[in-house]
Amino acid sequence: MGGKITMAALLVILAANLLQSTYGRTYTVGDSTGWRIPTNNNDDFYDDWADNKDFLVGDVLVFNFTNGQHNVVEVTEGGYDACNAANPVSTVSTGPARITLNRTGEYYFICGIPGHCSAGQKLNVEVRNGNPTGGVTPSTPITPTTTTYTVGDSTGWRVPTNNDDFYEDWADNKHFVVGDVLVFNFTTGQHNVAEVTEDAYDDCNTANAISTLTTGPARITLNKTGDHYFICSVPGHCSAGQKLKVEVRTGNTTGGVAPSPSVTPSTTTFTVGDSTGWRVPTTNDDFYEDWADNKHFVVGDVLVFNFTTGQHNVAEVTEDGYDDCDAANAISTLTTGPARVTLNSTGDHYFICSIPGHCSAGQKLKVEVRNGNRTSTSPTPGTPSAAAPGTPSGTTNGTSSSPGTNTASSHVATLSLVFFMSIALTLFC
């Protein structure tokens, strides 16, 4: 009897190890420090961080950074050594960025902001096949229960009317945790979002802002516990009530708190022009009109415009501006590619490239956005759905539906576990 129990226990352990080996781990790059320029002149910070880790195919790297201040550029070994992002493998400019390690070999990542890589914001990881070693402890994974909050709900981010405490009241009944995302909806050029210290918040002073985002809608990931302070730095706006303080905690959100309308799980990320990207069409002025014809866009969907910075841009304009190829009074203009635009209202949206001659040559896009569930129309082939709020697209490394988990492998692991458990139970009985 004792021999049977021992054999059963061994089989259970073997099955558990097999199951674990098929599930990738999620590593937060730099742990609580996140992805930024290392302090104290420690150029080897990320090298040291990676040293004691055993990365496997299927693992996921999460880069936590503030949008507009950093990015993640995958480069070649030569680009890594020279801190040169001129010919990147991929670039992700929205944080937190999730990159799945989907092959063996060396991966090289840098921040493409001038001076950041040379100051140590660079990471090299070696990826292998096989089981992770027992002594390696993964970094803290991002919890799947995080929430995307639209600041001010339908009001958005603007100077409140007749209520200086509007944003304070909005935040009062909410329970913010690390990993949650704040979306500030505002018109570019009329407002901005500056993260500041407590004193600066009280004084409405942005002289030494921690970060400032000037393009709306702005997405900010709450990546540490404690109080976070946000104001609009346009003169007079903060003192009129356009300011927000949130307290961030660790742990799951409480069941009784109803989050603001978040990006619905059925929203889709569309890559404009698919593999062609965003450029002047060749021999077809209606290229982007044809691209949009068979698609059903809903509120919350994201358009990704892939273009070379300095050669193109994306200007959202009025219908007249679209018809006349006139960006003089653009609603917003994005000059850094790839550009991500969230469709946050119903109706027609108009986009052009404002570089002279480009729009008239066909580099223009009109999309009609509706409310409601998506019809059976499929999204752009190969374009992932925005399954988790704040998950960026545009990286060449596909992110699986569950962090670091390969669906086929999980089925194999489950069947294997059932098989071994059946044998164990037979021996035990």
Image (spheres, rainbow, N blue to C red):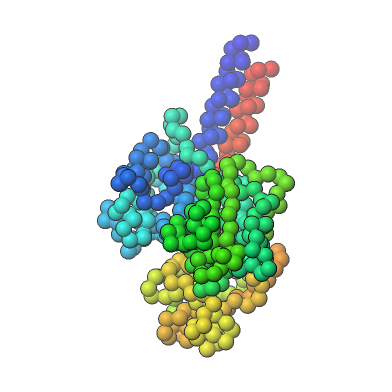
- Residue at left 44%, top 74%? 313
Which is nearer the eye, 242 or 133? 242
Name the residue furthest bottom: 324
268 left or right of 107 in image: right
- Residue at left 62%, top 22%? 424
119 relative to 357, above or below: above
161 relative to 200, above or below: below
- Residue at left 57%, top 18%? 7
- Residue at left 54%, top 84%? 322
Which is nearer the eye, 297 or 345? 345
Find residue 328 and report its horizontal and vertical position in percent.
49, 84
Which quadrant is home to the N terminus? top right
398 left or right of 374 in image: left
Which quadrant is home to the C terminus? top right
298 left or right of 194 in image: right
Q: State whether residue 304 appears in this view.
A: no
Find residue 426 and report its horizontal and vertical position in percent.
66, 21
Q: State whether residue 359 appears in this view.
A: yes
53 left or right of 191 in image: left
Find residue 409 and report its horizontal and vertical position in percent.
55, 42
267 relative to 36, above or below: below
